[in-house]
Image (spheres, rainbow, N blue to C red):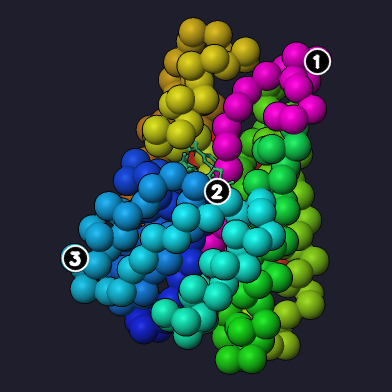
Amino acid sequence: METGVSGRTAVLSGAAKPSGLGYAFSEGLAREGVNIVIADIEDGSESAAALRRLGVKAQFVRCNVADEADVSALAAEVGREFGGCDILIHCASPFPTHHLDDMEFAEWKLVTSVNLDGMFLLAHAFLPGMKERGWGRIIPISSTTYHAGLGGRTHYVAAKAGLIGLTRSLAREVGDYGVTVNALAPGLVRTQGAADSHVADPVYSGEDPYSIIREQQCIRQSLLPANLVGPLLFLASDQSAYVTGQTLLVDAGWQHVG
Ligand SMILES: NC(=O)c1ccc[n+]([C@@H]2O[C@H](COP(=O)([O-])OP(=O)(O)OC[C@H]3O[C@@H](n4cnc5c(N)ncnc54)[C@H](O)[C@@H]3O)[C@@H](O)[C@H]2O)c1
């Protein structure tokens, strides 16, 4: 598949950890010749160095995406070093788990803010450049849990639903500028972030969520980050130029919607 993205620049929030989805997406894009900026609160300098070894320009910028000043500093750095962002992928999210009646308001605000305020701030920072250049891809990382519902994560699922609402609405504002907005909704994927969240999980309480959810999927195999890279590349590429406002579920057939 000719992706047509070589030489473009992608900014990926939440892509610092080599075990995570964001890093798998970065690697897939880098193999297509896309320059990469990793924006994360955790150190992503080793990940950026590994991407540079694939022959692209890659940089880590420490950034809390829910903080306006941090995102402005990120945008300034991306402008200076890369000349702007063509592909924006918002992967950053914390994963605390509590039933709603045990949840502190601060935890609710953290999860909704990183997902939604983060998306607003990133899109607000990078959209003007995309419109000016007449090409852009905005890809919020949502979650199949929006379609399934999942106890212990009301904040998370509400925030992931919000990203789908933003996707549908922002797509209507920017289509005439060559910019598409499509959410990617993974099912349960084997990442360190997801595994850590299951340790204190009030829903699965000691049982293995992977084996439970696997039995509910059409394809009864646990997803790995690599399994989502092809769909992500499609949404980031010229191949999807006339797909916008959509949510692509990549969940091995866990949920059927549409
Ligand atoms: N793994 C799954 O099963 C699964 C399923 C559906 C959706 N997702 C989504 O995929 C994305 C990546 O998750 P993952 O499983 O790869 O886990 P991960 O822990 O590797 O990724 C999350 C990243 O977000 C970063 N982050 C957290 N708060 C931040 C902030 N304020 N600013 C910047 N970065 C911040 C973390 O440091 C981490 O690197 C998340 O949005 C997650 O909700 C994951």
Residue 92, label in figure: 2
Judged left or right of residue 64, residue 60 is: left
Does 21 sit above or below residue 155?
A: below
The spot of residue 121 in percent (x, y) is 69, 62
Q: CA distance from mark 3 to mark 1?
A: 48 Å
| Residue assigned mark 1 | 101
> Does the beta carbon at disc 2 come under 8 Å from ligand 1?
yes
Judged left or right of residue 55, residue 255 is: right
For disc 2, the neighbor class at 10 Å (few under 14, some 14 to 19, many from 20) is many
Q: Quick check: marks 3 and 1 in contact, CB under 8 Å? A: no
The spot of residue 100 in percent (x, y) is 78, 20
Q: Residue at x 51, y 80 (%)?
A: 79
Residue 53, label in figure: 3
- Amino acid carrying label 1: it is Asp
Q: Quick check: marks 2 and 3 in contact, CB under 8 Å? A: no
The spot of residue 128 in percent (x, y) is 67, 82
Query: 251 or 237: nearer the eye?
Result: 237
The spot of residue 244 in percent (x, y) is 66, 71
Query: 131 or 150: nearer the eye?
Result: 131
Query: 224 or 85: nearer the eye?
Result: 85
* Span of residues in magenta: 88-107
Which numbered disc, 3 or 1, marks the residue that appears first in the sequence? 3
Q: Residue at x 76, y 69 (%)?
A: 170
Tag 2 secondary structure? loop
